[in-house]
Amino acid sequence: MAKQLQYRRLFWLALLLCAAFAGLGYRLVDLQVVRHVELKAKAAKNTQREFLLEPRRGDILDVKGNLLATTVDVKTVCADPRLVGESHLELARLLAPLLNENESRLAAKLQDRWRTNALGEVTVRKCVILKKRVPVETWDKVQQAIAAFSFGLDETRMTKAEARKLKSRREGVVFAQPEQMRVYPQETLAAHVLGFTGIEDKEINERPVTQIVGRDGIELTLDEKLAGVRGWRVTETDRNKNELVALREQNVEPRDGFNVVLTIDSVVQHILEAELAAAKQKHDPISICGMVVRPKTGEILGMATLPNFDANRPGGATRNRMVTDQVEPGSTFKIVVVSAALNEDVVKLTDLFDCENGRFHYAGRTLHDHHPLKILSVERIVTKSSNIGAAKIGIKLGEKHLYDYMKAFGFGARTGLPLLGESAGTVHPVNKWSKVSIAQIPMGHGVAVTPLQMTMAMCAIANKGVLMRPMLVDRLEENDHTVVAKYAPQRVRQVISEETARQMVTALKTVVTPEGTAAKAALDHYTAAGKTGTAQKVENGTYVRKYIASFIGFFPADDPELCISVFLDEPRIGGSYGGETAGPAFKQIAERVANYLSIRPDLSTEVAALRKPAVEVTEGAGQSSSGGQ
């Protein structure tokens, strides 16, 4: 009987052991086979961390290496509300002056321990952002202040364990995440060229990421080159989330963005902006813009629009009028019809035209000159800026030739400048012209251009008839100044022959003489050439007595180094004509830039001394029946 009882007990014990081993085996199979992938992922999630490594956004430099835009390291200061406890008011009082934040608002953030997710679940907040873009120096002060913060505890009576706990609490309660901030050291200088940046929040691999993105100007068009490429690190961490370097699995360093070196010269840019500001104060236009360019290469040394803005705090005046605004060009457009007629051998500079004593009836319209003019040569038509003379040259040239040369000079098409928002202008095909268009277009009516297009057309004449693509970016560099890409000047086309260009220069030099429309644009030590413009504005389809005054000139005239343009939108003081307003601004810019760049004078000291004081002759701003020029 006793033996049977022993056998029975042994049986149940064996059965129990078998069941236990079977359960253990099942559990092992479940963990190691059935749920292997799931549990491995959970384990990795608890100990493995993936960090995104942000690249540094590249700098923007001028042609001589002066810094125009850069990226600095800053901090996003955060706090863990769980560790603040009942000390939120004291901690807010400590941090408010350091972070330059409102004390009550900080206290509310430090007390905000709960949040509701998208599913309506209430969870504990581990991180609240106290302030973004905090300088590193300020963060160091915050750390020093937190190191002395006691959380209302008496440190003199603490045990070593309690002291360690307080130290850990101090280290975790307020912390910082690395961030980058875009800074423009020169503030408003070249702001319309540089543009500005913004902050974009997005998720990458389910991780929130904040990055700097271009919003306008070079910052936007070359955003991909400037931004760089993120890196990443996959590593193991201990229970305190400290990295175990020996267990690091992947470490791909980020590639910093390229530095963009512009053709802009910051000194030339400063001179341009200063003189435009002086002209704006003197003549009170709505806006004023201009540029300085090398005609032989198309390199833009300066481009500005006023009113300006601080790229660190961009406001509303961010439109670059040199490239976005399309307006009727007025008399500056006469260079197109005259050069086209000379190039087609339709006229010579010495050919005479009757300017009808200031009134010319054509196709049911009456065209006017500002002053009654009679018989003028083609050269004198340019000198005096005769509307009627230009109209008669256009009629003789013909519609097709005029249209073809307008397109050849680049009107009606974008120049390819690396700035977004560039307008193509408006050049209607011949089949949409009215009967009077052939007479009005040579005066600068019935066509819309950008100031940039008009400037580059003048550069083509200065450059022996060759139209160049405007150039704003010189090269891309690594941080160690290794050149990644070097951009060369690009020739677009030969618009007019070299001989025609030489004849046009001869005519344009007379514009800045005492008999021309821009006597005040004459330079003291250089022979200048150029053309004035006074274009009537159109409002609601009707010409109104509001004008865009302009002057585009180059020097030294026979071997040009620079072409400079100035455009004033509705000058309200000191006259409306380009020769009265834009011409003097051209002179001031040209002489200061020539001195800075050490451009060799082409006039002797004696000749310069004998030059007579300028006497202004206004260019044609006469009206047709549809408006004026």
Image (tube, rainbow, N blue to C red):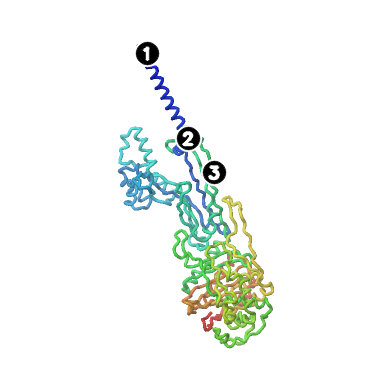
Query: Counting other residues with Cα less than 10 Å from the Cα at mark 3, is it few (<14), some (14-19), or many (20 or more)?
Result: few
Q: Nearer the viewer, residue 272 or 40?
A: 40
Residue 322, image x and y in percent? 53, 68
Residue matched to label 3: 252
Q: Which residue type does callout 1 highlight?
A: Gln
Q: Which mark is residue 36?
A: 2
Q: Secondary structure at mark 1?
A: helix
Residue at image location 31% in from the left, 35% down from the top: 156
Q: Which mark is residue 4?
A: 1
Determine whether label 3 and label 2 are within 8 Å by CB: no
Residue 472, image x and y in percent? 57, 62
Q: CA distance from mark 1 to mark 2?
A: 45 Å
Query: Counting other residues with Cα less than 10 Å from the Cα at mark 2, is it few (<14), some (14-19), or many (20 or more)?
Result: few
Q: Nearer the viewer, residue 444 or 559?
A: 444
Residue at image location 45% in from the left, 32% down from the top: 30
- The numbered mark, 1 or 2, whose residue comes first in the sequence reads 1
Q: Quadrant of residue 19?
A: top left
- The numbered mark, 1 or 3, whose residue comes first in the sequence reads 1
* Quarter of the image where the N terminus is located: top left
558 relative to 316 in the view: left or right = right
Q: Nearer the viewer, mark 1 or mark 3?
A: 1
Residue 365, image x and y in percent? 55, 85
Q: Nearer the viewer, mark 3 or mark 2?
A: 2
Q: Nearer the viewer, mark 1 or mark 2?
A: 1
Q: Is residue 73 above or below residue 444?
A: above
Q: Is residue 418 above or below residue 620?
A: above
Res. 539 visible in picture: yes
Q: Quadrant of residue 459?
A: bottom right
Q: Which residue type does callout 2 highlight?
A: His
Q: Quadrant of residue 83?
A: top left
Q: Nearer the viewer, residue 557 or 485?
A: 485
Q: Is residue 151 above or below residue 61?
A: above
